[in-house]
Image (cartoon, rainbow, N blue to C red):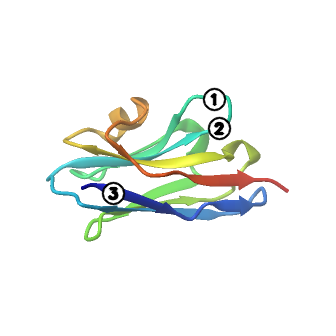
Amino acid sequence: QLQLVESGGGLVQPGGSLRLSCAVSGFTFNYYVIGWFRQAPGKEREGVSCISSGDGSTYYTDSVKGRFTISRDNANITVYLQMSSLKPEDTAVYYCGFGEGHYSSTYYCRAGGFGSWGQGTQVTVSS
């Protein structure tokens, strides 16, 4: 059974950094796409950053480009989101999403994700 376990959220001051982790277990497919999504109160879920298994291509939504970096550990299928220069508008619940199949990171993020989800981790940026 596929499981996603997230960690790393918390409270940070504006300009600070956090690193989110998502560990995937129970995976049995050759291709996958994985990414981070966030949902703030009263807003729709947004694809923040995604990475595909095939060529490792990445996608970032415009508001996080240059501040966030997605990476993966293929051996353990763990994906990380390094978040720097955090802003109050980054405050949201962040979810890890995992899609089975050969999808591009851009497609997965812009589609809002599908497949399996982690439990979510709260990120609060506030002074």
Disc assigned to residue 43: 1
Report whether 24 appears left or right of 126: left
Residue 38 in which image quadrant: top right
Distance between mark 1 and mark 2 Cα atoms: 5 Å
Name the residue type under label 3: Gln
Label 3: element kind = strand
Question: In which quadrant will I find the C terminus?
Answer: bottom right
Left or right placement of residue 18 versus residue 118 in this view: right
Rendered position, 79 above or below 62: below
Circle on res. 10? none
- Outermost bottom residue: 75
Quadrant that contains the N terminus:
bottom left
SS under mark 1: loop
Residue denoted by label 2? 40
> Alpha-carbon neighbours of circle 1 within 10 Å: few (<14), some, or many (≥20)?
few
Q: Earlier in the sequence, mark 3 or mark 2?
A: 3
Of 60 and 7, nearer the camera is 7
Snapshot quadrant of residue 78: bottom left
Residue pointed to by mark 3 = 3
In contact (CB < 8 Å): disc 1 and disc 2: yes
Q: Is residue 97 above or below residue 17?
A: above
Residue at image x 69%, y 46%? 91
